[in-house]
Each structure stands twice: as C-alpha cells, then as structure tokens.
Amino acid sequence: AQSVTQPDIHITVSEGASLELRCNYSYGATPYLFWYVQSPGQGLQLLLKYFSGDTLVQGIKGFEAEFKRSQSSFNLRKPSVHWSDAAEYFCAVGPNNNDMRFGAGTRLTVKP
Amino acid sequence: GAGVSQTPSNKVTEKGKYVELRCDPISGHTALYWYRQSLGQGPEFLIYFQGTGAADDSGLPNDRFFAVRPEGSVSTLKIQRTERGDSAVYLCASSLAAGGTDEQFFGPGTRLTVL
C-alpha cells in the first residue's frame, strides 16, 4: 500500500532564507509524486509533480523538488522564502492522478 | 475561468441529521473527486467519478456516505445520520480526465461541524 510521511509538522524560517520540506513515501512501483500548497481559505494548489524523466522538477512560485529513488524521498525546496509562502504543504503519492495518498502536511511559518 | 466551487462553505448540523454537500466542477472536466480533511491531517480520498459513474468508492468510510453525479457535472455528497466524527472539511476536485497525469483542481471545501 502506498503511504506518505512528512516528518516535520511545523517549520519556521526567516524571510529570504532557504527552505527544504521533507517527504518520504512508500510505494511498490514507480510512483507519481506531487506537492500541493494550501493557504488559509484557499483550495489546494498543485506546486509540482513528478511522473518520469528528470528527477529534479521545477514548479510554480520558484519551488523545485528532487526525486531520490534510493531514499524514497521527494523533498521540496526553495532558495529564498517569501512571506507569502506561509501555508500548509502536502506531499502526495499515487499510481496516477486518481489514487493519491496525502501526507499529514507541514505548516510553514515565515518570520520577517 | 471559474474554478471548482463548493456549497455551502460552512455547515453546522446536529448529530443524527442528514446533510448534502455540493460540488460544481470546472466546465468540461469529466473526472470529479471527493476528499475529507480532518484537523491536522492531509486530504483523505473518498470517491471519484469518471462521467456519471463512481469509478472508485473505496474510500467511503461506511454506508452512511453516498455520492452522486447524475448528469456528469455537479456532484452531491450525502451523509446520513451524521456523527460527531464526521466533522471535517470536505474537499472536491476535478480534472479533465481520470487515470492519467491531468492535474486535479481543488475547491475551497465545505467545513462540516456535527454538534
């Protein structure tokens, strides 16, 4: 069965600092991997996805993620965080876009 | 263009009552998904439709939950005999088609509170 672990419940970074949010997955085959962001009062928005090919994936809002099969990880990164990036971030895994399993999320706080 | 809309945005009901939650997908999207998000958790898959038919309802927790999509557009999630444990945010998403790589677009959710 597929599952996702986001080890960090809450992370605080200073504005302008770099960010890395961790995601580890369990899946029996080549997974489809996703990162979503959820801002208060907003719907979930897709930041990026990995299906195949280049393991470094670029997304919207300056985010990127790297698929590391050997570590079963798909960590999200951003070189310089903006105050507007404060939100909840969810990693998801699935065989396709139907059957996604989400992690519990990481809440990001940005200090001025 | 319009995104996925959900009504109502908030619903407060009493234990044992029946509720209906509505989802309007993006026009032209054939796939529609329902998720439940409890406090401090990620979205949990409930059911998805391809057209009018429920292609996978394996996430529905029990037979008190039911969803329909009679004309292949709007969907209604129905919960009978509500329990306090049903309190959560119910999310709807739609995509062009299911089973591939099309992005799911999420609505803002309906917050259900069962007193």
Image: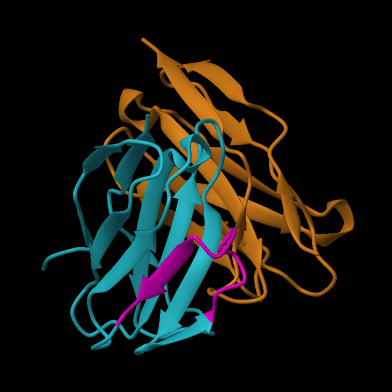
Of B16 and B109, which appears nearest the observer? B16
Which chain wears cyan? B
Please identify the quarter of the rendering in which residue A20 is found. top right
Residue B57 visible:
yes
Which residues are the magenta region? B56-69
The answer to whether residue A59 of the structure is visible from this angle is: no
Residue at the image position 33 percent from the left and 86 percent from the top: B30
| Coloring applied to the structure | by chain
Say which chain is orange. Answer: A
**Residue B64, placed above or below residue B66:** above
Who is closer to the viewer here, B36 or A24?
Answer: B36
Residue B48 sits inside the magenta stretch: no
**Residue in the picture at 66% in, 54% down:** A66
Determine the residue located farthest toward the right in the rendered image: A70
Magenta: main secondary structure equals loop
User: Residue A106, image x and y in percent?
Assistant: 57, 32
